[in-house]
Image (cartoon, rainbow, N blue to C red):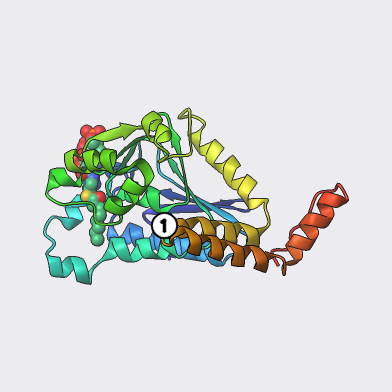
Amino acid sequence: MALENIVVSTDGAVGLIQLNRPKVLNALSGALMIELGDAVEAMDKDASIRCIVIHGSERAFSAGADIDQMKTATPVSMIENNWINRNFDRLRHVTKPIIAAVSGYCLGGGCELAMSCDIILASETAQFGQPEISIGIIPGAGGTQRLPRAIGKSRAMELVLTGKFIGAREAEARGLVSRVAPVELYLEEAKTLAREIASKPPVAVRFAKEAINKVYELPLTEGLDYESRLFHVLFSTEDQKEGMAAFVEKRKPEWKGK
Ligand code: CO8
């Protein structure tokens, strides 16, 4: 089916998804979220893709959920037609790393989308915020949970209660984003980072992502045990044998993803 709200392409082993509703600053409509969920799931199943980059335009990663679509919603319609959360959940189950390359507005559901990814790389113009309070609601796709984990409770409380935005440099200083690049370079840097991740052994990459994400779910001792189990399982892979043999033989490893 033709895509109307996103643009999907590949660059070698990197899958690229561009949010593409420029007239409304990439507001997340139900149709966009379904296309996005379908695209990430298809890329997760595609063995030729090893890392995914989601981006918007220089002006906006996304200004949040489509307010026009939500304005007449009722609690029942939001529960029955839960297009944002249902499709965010599809993203959460993707096993390959996802990089959010963020420029311009990254607000509300857009900020929640970026935080659902594994790495956020920002342009100098990026602005992050959860402005839902100003339209009579609160973040509904993880913002109250993920933002405090990323930037601390006090600052997250301030942003969620006032709807104020923070810039790329503050987001970097507080650990919300891993790095900031000039606006003309941010997407290229995200692709370079994705290519680097894509060049690593896929099973180890998958386990590393899984183990790090457990930090939000498990107490330390259980997390350490979880990491140990994944670590031990990797010794059953051909890539572990290849990686260590290549190191000893001083040659480049050839990964099989097995
Ligand atoms: N939804 C729909 N349309 C939008 C949105 C949006 N979130 N954001 C911007 N637009 C539209 C504007 O209406 C405008 O359209 P038009 O040209 O037809 O008037 C166009 O995009 C350009 O926007 P502006 O003219 O306002 O551009 P500015 O540069 O002046 O301002 C801002 C940019 C500051 C980003 C401003 O547009 C704004 O404040 N947008 C709304 C931001 C917001 O409140 N986001 C949170 C939305 S709610 C949400 O995300 C909840 C998520 C969880 C839901 C879970 C459900 C299950």
Instruction: Identify which residue is drawn at 18% across, 42% down.
Output: 161
243 or 140: which is nearer to us?
A: 243
Ligand 1 positioned in quadrant? top left
Find out if the beta carbon at label 1 lies less than 8 Å from the nearest ligand 1 atom: no
Looking at the image, the residue that sits furthest to the right is 249
Looking at the image, the residue that sits furthest to the front is 221
Three-letter amino acid code at disc 1? Tyr
Q: Compared to 60, does 64 lie above or below?
A: below
16 or 144: which is nearer to us?
A: 144
Residue 157 is at least partly visible in this image: yes
Residue 125 is at least partly visible in this image: no
| Left or right of 49, for residue 1 | left
Toward which corner of the image does residue 172 lie, by quadrant? top left
Point out the image quarter for the C terminus. Answer: bottom right
Q: Compared to 100, does 31 lie above or below?
A: below
| Residue annotated with mark 1 | 216
Point out the image quarter for the N terminus. Answer: bottom left
Instruction: Identify which residue is drawn at 32% across, 46% down.
Output: 148
| Left or right of 116, for residue 79 | left
Residue 51, percent from left and from top: 57, 53
Q: Compared to 54, does 187 lie above or below?
A: above
Residue 182, percent from left and from top: 48, 27
57 or 148: which is nearer to us?
A: 148
Q: Residues within 10 Å of mark 1 (few under 14, many from 20)?
A: few
Residue 192, percent from left and from top: 60, 40
Picture mark count: 1
Disc 1 secondary structure class: helix
Toward which corner of the image does residue 125 lie, by quadrant? top left
| Left or right of 198, for residue 158 | left
Residue 222, percent from left and from top: 49, 64
